[in-house]
Image (cartoon, rainbow, N blue to C red):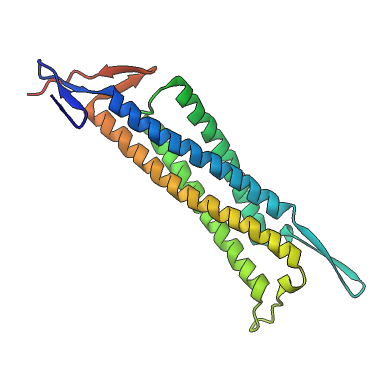
Amino acid sequence: MSYLGVGVSPGNVPVYHGSNLKAIDRRVRLAELVLRCVICGFAILSAVLVSTDTQVKEIFTFRKTAKFTNMKALVFLVAANGLVAGYSLVQVLRCVMSMIRGSVLLNKPLAWAIFSGDQVMAYLTIAAVGAAEESAVFAKFGQTQLEWMQICNMYGKFCNQVGEGIASGLLVSISMVVLSAISGFSVCFVCMAIKKGKVWEGGKNYVMSTRVV
């Protein structure tokens, strides 16, 4: 007899079908891999767009160069995207290796570590994009009460490229939030599998023989 992937042997020993467990894990792992690749790509793109953006403007006899280091929020955005790109690359390699081996993640401490890392990166990207967007609004529209100029009127090319970098960073932050939800599901998946008595070692399926009273 089977119910929700759980079978009962003649000796009243619960047996859990490995095919359902591995199928769910495969789908989750594939979605995670795709998202991590997307995050890595857009994080690199955002960091490159912002860090390489410069524009020289001549004001009377002075030459003023606009670059990302002039705004601390943009420096924060570049640093955050660099960290996220490196972290995502490591996680992509982990996902690829686990898919090649065909093993199922049933390591509770590792699942929690991945979930915690994804949470930290999600909060980091949200904070960086939020700070950069706030600075971009002031650069675009200025602040008359504080007599801040509309910088983008003078440095249009610089502002446009920074805007593209912030947009890429926004995609990174959204993807990290979605990925954090997937990581949270993975933690629940591991906890339920361990609770049911399913043990995976070296890609082989073992069943804990806990007799039902």
Q: Quadrant of the N terminus?
A: top left
Whether residue 24 sits left or right of residue 1 in the image: it is: right
Residue extending farthest right: 61
Q: Residue at x 60, y 39 (%)?
A: 86
Tell which of 176 and 34 is nearer to you: 34
Q: Quadrant of the C terminus?
A: top left
Tell which of 88 and 23 is nearer to you: 23
Tell which of 198 and 42 is nearer to you: 42
Residue 5 location, x and y as percent?
A: 22, 28
Q: Residue at x 63, y 60 (%)?
A: 73
Q: Residue at x 74, y 56 (%)?
A: 53
Whether residue 97 sits left or right of residue 67 in the image: it is: left
Q: Which image quarter: residue 186?
A: top left
Q: Is residue 208 depicted above or below 146 in this figure? A: above
Residue 42 location, x and y as percent?
A: 59, 47
Residue 176 location, x and y as percent?
A: 48, 48
Q: Residue at x 27, y 24 (%)?
A: 198
Q: Is residue 106 depicted above or below 141 in this figure? A: above
Residue extending farthest left: 213
Q: Is residue 75 depicted above or below 20 in this figure? A: below
Whether residue 47 sits left or right of residue 11 in the image: it is: right
Residue 126 location, x and y as percent?
A: 52, 56
